[in-house]
Image (cartoon, rainbow, N blue to C red):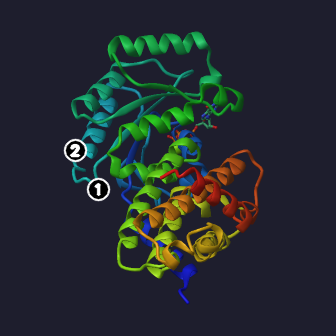
């Protein structure tokens, strides 16, 4: 008997340990709303996770399992302070050149009610452009200002920095939904990161469900391709250990993409991972029973196509359940994992994906 729960936990850990993390530099004056914006995009866990510590004077590092955030202290007014600040930031960026260490994105925050677009801001944004470093301007606290102000500010920025990406952000719930800026920031960030970093970013963010779903789907397709090569070996059974092991790894991957342990606020992460491992164990072992025909396929053997098909059906089913669960969590319904990840829901979905032949 294979220890699926054990394998799931090991796989999950390995996926997390080998994930490549994006480095995001969050700049802006003190009180401009940097920490608040980070919370809005990543949820409270990221900002809470460990106190930041200064690597360089004035820049605090927050190392999270999925991303690294570099949060600069604000600057005082005055020409000299400003040029010192600019030097500090560009030295910091220039000194981090390896793929792992380098800054991948900049979120440049200005509080809309408090700020004008100054020469220093333009120098910063130009400096990022020269270094080919993607930088978005975040106009924060827009609820405390007016639409006219926002329009004026944006016009002032664009006249100096044509094509500059600008997002308006706020903590006001109604305005937040109206502006849809969290999804927009996630989209922009993904589009400006190397592909190898997409998954970590998408796992870390609190929203962006469509993007997460796509990432899950991509992962399923990779595992389905692997299943096909396993299925191509002589006489593999539908429930062959190699096939099941691949499916457990796939579910662990989906659990990582959807960051399931994080979402169960009430339970320890132990419960969450147990529930997910149940998915791998229960479903993988029962595929033969769930999908009519697979067990009797050529008298118990399957081929590459069927191996890929069952793996795809299972992966898409789990990916969909994950999305439903996360959606319910975001809507504040505090769902129990078991109410989503149970045999009945899984079987129904697996069957329907298998029938659709979506692979
Ligand atoms: N009304 C309103 N207040 C906000 C918004 N964003 C942040 N604030 C408030 O502004 C203050 C500063 O926000 P922070 O997120 O701590 O700002 P910060 O840039 O991280 O500040 P430092 O870490 O000191 O540099 C806090 O009291 C927030 O509650 C917003 O969108 N609307
Ligand atoms: Mg802060």
Q: Residue at x 53, y 75 (%)?
A: 8
Q: Position of residue 25 (x, y in %)?
A: 39, 43
Q: Residue at x 50, y 64 (%)?
A: 311
Q: Position of residue 255 (x, y in %)?
A: 55, 62
Find residue 157 and report its image quarter: top left
Q: CA distance from mark 2 to mark 1?
A: 14 Å
| Residue at the disc numbered 1 | 100
Looking at this rendering, what residue extends furthest in the bottom direction? 1
| Residue at the disc numbered 2 | 94
Find residue 292 and report its image quarter: bottom right
Report ligand 1 position as a quadrant.
Answer: top right
Find residue 344 and report its image quarter: bottom right
- Observer-nearest of 347 and 208: 347
Mark 2 or mark 1, earlier in chain? 2
- State whether residue 295 is above or below residue 354: below
Q: Residues within 10 Å of mark 1 (few under 14, many from 20)?
A: few
Residue contact between numbered discs 2 and 1, judged by CB atoms under 8 Å:
no
């Amino acid at each position: 008997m294979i220890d699926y729960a054990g394998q799931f936990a090991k796989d999950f850990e390995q996926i997390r340990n080998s994930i490549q993390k994006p480095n995001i530099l969050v700049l802006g004056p003190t009180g401009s709303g940097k920490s608040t914006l980070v919370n809005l995009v990543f949820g409270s866990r990221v900002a809470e996770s460990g106190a930041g510590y200064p690597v360089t004077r004035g820049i605090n590092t927050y190392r999270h399992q999925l991303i690294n955030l570099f949060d600069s202290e604000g600057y005082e007014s005055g020409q000299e302070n400003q040029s010192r600040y600019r030097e500090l930031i560009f030295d910091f960026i220039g000194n981090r050149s390896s793929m792992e260490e380098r800054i991948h994105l900049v979120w440049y925050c200005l509080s809309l009610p408090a700020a004008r677009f100054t020469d220093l801001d333009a120098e910063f944004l130009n400096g990022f452009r020269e270094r080919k470093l993607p930088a978005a301007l975040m106009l924060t606290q827009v609820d405390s200002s007016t639409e006219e102000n926002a329009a004026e500010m944006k016009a002032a920025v664009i006249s100096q920095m044509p094509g500059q990406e600008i997002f308006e952000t706020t903590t006001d719930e109604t305005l937040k939904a109206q502006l849809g800026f969290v999804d927009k920031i996630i989209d922009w960030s993904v589009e400006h990161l190397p592909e190898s970093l997409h998954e970590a970013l998408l796992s870390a963010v609190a929203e962006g469900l469509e993007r997460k779903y796509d990432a899950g789907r991509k992962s399923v397709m990779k595992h389905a391709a692997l299943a096909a090569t396993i299925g191509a070996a002589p006489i593999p059974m539908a429930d062959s250990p190699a096939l099941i092991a691949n499916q457990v790894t796939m579910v662990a991957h989906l659990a990582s993409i959807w960051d399931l342990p994080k979402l169960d606020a009430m339970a320890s992460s132990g419960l969450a991972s147990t529930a997910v491992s149940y998915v791998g164990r229960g479903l993988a072992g029962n595929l033969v029973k769930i999908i009519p025909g697979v067990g009797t396929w050529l008298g118990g053997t399957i081929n590459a196509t069927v191996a890929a098909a069952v793996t795809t059906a299972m992966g898409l089913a789990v990916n969909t359940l994950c999305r439903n669960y996360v959606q319910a969590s975001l809507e504040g319904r505090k769902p129990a994992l078991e109410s989503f990840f149970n045999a009945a829901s899984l079987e129904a979905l697996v069957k329907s994906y298998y029938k659709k032949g979506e692979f």
